[in-house]
Each structure stands twice: as structure tokens, then as C-alpha cells.
Amino acid sequence: MADQTDARTPLPRRVRTMLDPDRRFVSEQVARDLSVRDVEALKAVVRDRSGRPESASLSRAIGALSVRDPSAETAELLATFGRDRSEDPVDRAAAAAGLRLIPLPEARRGLTRLVTAPDYIVRVEALKAAGCIGDESMLRTLERLDRRPEGGEERQRAFAMALITHRLGVSGDHIPFQPGVARRAGKDADLIDLSLRPVRSKTIAGERERLRGSDYSIPLSDRVGFALSAGKARWTVFVNADLADGGGVFARSSRIFERPWITALLARIDDRTKTSAVQYIVLSDPDEAGARIMVIRTDGEPFYSGNLTRPKGMLSFVVRDIARKATAPTNVRGRLTTRGVEFDVRIPFGSRRDPNTGDTVSTPDASRTR
């Protein structure tokens, strides 16, 4: 591809390589290693159409900028680019997505305009970003939007509003609670191994380094976290530091019953890249019995729900799958102790089932767990 169209300002070699669509995907680490000169060159590429190389991958430039330089200047640049209808909608959507990594007023102001963009792909990415960094003003903006037909965009708007209210600790019913299904254990061959164990601060620090993407604007505990595995799939459970780091023992904490919370982030580990990204978010809401929890995928689809109680002063939990097409039946009950996690029931299934032909709905005996 051509190196440049403006001979007066040759692009740094690393930037030329990054913008080449025929080159391999740009990792977050490569973006973090960009020099100040590289960053300024990328900004110029995004800002000025006349100086871009032919066939430049603008999405890469935008993604690298949001990782390497999450500044007010970058936020304003991406917001302006996202509104420019002369640019490709895919690149404009990348600009909206990049704003989720910049939790600054400039990014939020830009998103208030991008959530009403004429292009569906831009609106959806703006809604996702709004859920990651939105504040009270953003919540009011989302509530004023015209309701879209049921589908991905409306689901993402509801999820964004739910994330903001739970981050702020205020009540809302943007995603109504859906009770899970209490399933009975079927054939042992259908079950997969499930493990949830606490990890040490050193491990949490290492997993934080592997985490890519948004932290949903919550502080992550550096002393309380868990390793979750179900069959071959593995997650790191990052716990909200406002729940875990207030002093005392996390298993005895009562703060989760005091207000709505973004309780935890479940980051799926990719063994190939040695990185992780948030796949599910745990939301909790206090109720008369303790607290309700919902585990929601990042596209706004609820997958699991349950409740938290505190019998004898220790946190106990029940998590079950929400009946939906092609769901993986799950029924887990246990408690946090000062020594770790103890299970009464563990019934995770390896294969997904049609809820209309699933297993008998009943509470199993602990003797049938594994």
C-alpha cells in the first residue's frame, strides 16, 4: 500500500505497519508500546482525510488510540469522527466503541450524540460504551430515547441503563429479574466439572494485566477474586472493590445487601492469546430476602440468576440458568466461608438444551452433585 499521500509528514514506520489492512491484528500490547510521535501521527490520520495512506485501516488507528492515549483530546477526536457521516460507518462505530475506554466528560458528551446516530452499528456501539462509562446525565439521555423495536439495540439500551443505575447504586427496573430454573441432575455423562476457588492477590494482579477492554468503571479488588472453571472454559471473577475492600472478611460482608451494585465481572480467559475480556457482568439488587443477582452477557442477554442470603453471618448463594433457547442448564448452590467456597449443589451441563425439553424442574439432593 502507499506509504502516505502527504510527503511533508511521513508516517512513522510502526504506524504505517499498523494501518496496513494486510498485516496481522494489532494487539493491545503493541498499542501500549507506541511512542508519543506514533500517537500524534495516528491522531493526524484520524483527523485529516487528505493525509491518510491508501486503504488505511482506520479502525486499527482508532482502537490503538483509545488504548494508548485515553485522554480528553482523543475523546473529542473520536466523538467528532463518529459524527462525520462522510466516514465509513464501520470506522465510525469503532470510534464510538473506543470511547468506552475513556471515562471522561468529553467522551460522555460525545456519546450523548452518537446514541442517536443514523447508522445502527454506530448507535449500538455508542450504547455499549454508554453502559461502560455513563453517569447520571447519560442515564437521563438514554431514558429519553425513543423505544426501538425489540432486538439487539433496545436490549443494549436497557442494559446500558441497568449498568449505570447499578454503578450509581440507585434502583431501576430496566432489566426485570428473571428467575432461574431449579433443575434435577440427569445423567452423569451430561455433567461437567465446575470449580470456583479464591485466588491470591498476586494472581489477581497478574489477571488484571491480562484483562483487555473496559472495567465498566468500577474499582476492582486487588485482594478478593476467584478462578471459575466449567469444563474447559475458564474465567477470572473480578470483584467490585467497594464490596470487598472495606475491611473485615468478604464472606461476612453485608454491603451487597445495602444497594444495587455491579458486583463482579467474569472475564473469559483465552489460552491462545494469554489475555482475557469480560464476558458476563453480575448485577445485584437488595430485596426482602437478601439480594437478587443476575448474570448478564455483555450484549445485554441475561443468562443466569439467583439470590444471595447471609444465614449465620456468611454469604450463601444460589445461581440457576434462565430458561431460554439453547441454554446450558445450570444449578449451583453454596456459600462463601473464611476458607473459600463450599458447594451444596453443582449441576452444570456441558451441552445446551431446548428449555421446552429440558430436565425435570426440581431441587436435587446434594448427593447427586459432583
Image: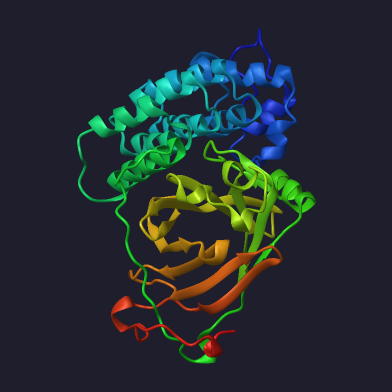
- Is residue 265 among the parts visible in the rendering? yes
Q: Position of residue 9 (x, y in %)?
A: 66, 11
The answer to whether residue 116 of the structure is visible from this angle is no
When asked about the image quadrant of residue 323, the answer is bottom left
What residue is drawn where x is 36% and y is 74%? Answer: 181
Side (left or right) of 146 relative to 274: left
Residue lying furthest top in this view?
8
Question: Image quadrant for the N terminus?
Answer: top right
Vertical order, 187 against 254 (above or below)? below
Drawn side of residue 19 relative to residue 333, left or right? right
Q: Nearer the viewer, residue 1 or 14?
A: 14
- Residue 173 point in image, percent of width and height: 29, 47
Residue at x-position 76% and y-position 48%? 206
Q: Residue at x 65, y 39 (%)?
A: 26
Residue 124 falls in image quadrant: top left
- Give the answer, above or below, for where 45 lies relative to 312: above
**Taking 195 as reference, is 173 above or below it?**
above
Query: What is the number of callouts on the image?
Result: 0
Where is residue 92 shown, x and y percent of the image? 43, 29
Indicate left or right for 336 with 116 as reference. right
The residue positioned farthest toward the front in the image shown: 312
Residue 160 percent location from the top left of the image: 38, 40
Q: Residue at x 69, y 45 (%)?
A: 208
**Front one among 121 and 339:** 339
Report the colour scheme: rainbow
Of 258 and 57, nearer the camera is 258
Q: Quadrant of the C terminus?
A: bottom right
Q: Which corner quadrant of the image does residue 188 belong to? A: bottom right
Residue 70, compared with residue 159, is above or below; it is above
